[in-house]
Image: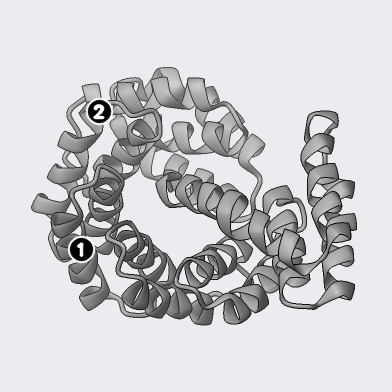
Amino acid sequence: MERDELLERAIALGEDEDWQGAADLLREYLDDFDDDPAVHCSLGVAERELGMEGVAYERFKRALALEPVDPYVLATAGSGLAYFDDPDAETALRAAALTAPHLVVGRLAYGAYLAREGLLEDALRELLAAREIDADDPQIAYELGVAYALAEDYDLSTDALADAVRLDPDDGWSRTVLGLVLVEADRVEEGTAELIAGARRGEDDLDAHLLAALAASATGREEWAYVMLERARLNATEDDLGMVSSVEDRLEAGHEASESMLLEEFAPKILRMRLHARP
């Protein structure tokens, strides 16, 4: 099989969410293309989607060791290393942005990396440049919202995150982050609506359901509070049941107890975690 045909078939399998099929195909021909960074990078993507993060990391390392010039490979492999806080990520992501300044993938990946490293002015430069190239990309809007939130500019953050939600209404993660930023900005009523909407779309997102339960109780939406609590219980592992019980105790104690847990304990913690989560 020719290299381009192999990559096209792997991409098609990935688009169909057949990551196992993509990984199997790429492994079958890996010996034939062992010196091709794009093949190693594509295999890393498939293995990461299969939950094989450590193996994927080694694929991305191998891809970059082969000194790629393709900005897509640089951006993808660099983002893969960034997930593990590997310092080589910065070099790859910067190269992707510099060698192809008119491609969204490089500017977006580099901007997202810089934001989580605390280099917020540089991050915003890259992300705003990415938005100039493609104003309808929900991931760009989301990463802009993250960068503004990390800079504690919650007005611009909510504007950007609202764009992300508008562009991808079914993304529960973005809705939950928008809800958290609204709560942080003392817009609890608005934030509650987004937290409930985010939890409804993220069926297996335990934290989203617990946040929605507390926010609903804090704002007098008792029916929604208990619906979200029960959905959280269904998704909880044995290790999670203690937190579910703690939230249930606050719901039973009333609005003020729920609001206290939401504003002083749970929401700030989950917001910090989600803002720093690597894409």
Considering depth in this image, is 93 or 203 the residue closer to the camera? Answer: 203
The type of residue carrying mark 1 is: Leu
Q: Residues within 10 Å of mark 2 (few under 14, many from 20)?
A: many
The way the protein has been coloured in the rendering is one colour
Q: On the rendered structure, is 160 left or right of 176? A: left
Residue in the image at 89% along x and 48% along y? 234
Instruction: Classify mark 1: helix, strand or loop.
Output: helix
Residue in the image at 81% along x and 77% along y? 221
The type of residue carrying mark 2 is: Leu
Question: Which label was assigned to residue 237?
Answer: none
Residue in the image at 74% along x and 58% along y? 209
Counting from the top left corner in percent of width and height, residue 162 is at 47, 79
Considering depth in this image, is 17 or 174 the residue closer to the camera? Answer: 174
Q: Residues within 10 Å of mark 1 (few under 14, many from 20)?
A: many
Q: Which residue is mark 1?
A: 124
Counting from the top left corner in percent of width and height, residue 79 is at 34, 41
Cβ–Cβ under 8 Å for marks 1 and 2: no
Instruction: Kindly give the residue lying farthest to the left in the view shown.
Output: 98
* Image quadrant in which you'd find residue 157: bottom left
The residues bearing labels 1 and 2 have C-alpha atoms spaced at a distance of 26 Å
Counting from the top left corner in percent of width and height, residue 134 is at 30, 76
Instruction: Classify mark 2: helix, strand or loop.
Output: helix
* Image quadrant in which you'd find residue 81: top left
Q: Which residue is mark 2?
A: 64
Considering depth in this image, is 232 or 144 the residue closer to the camera? Answer: 232
Q: Earlier in the sequence, mark 1 or mark 2?
A: 2
Relative to 74, residue 196 above or below: below
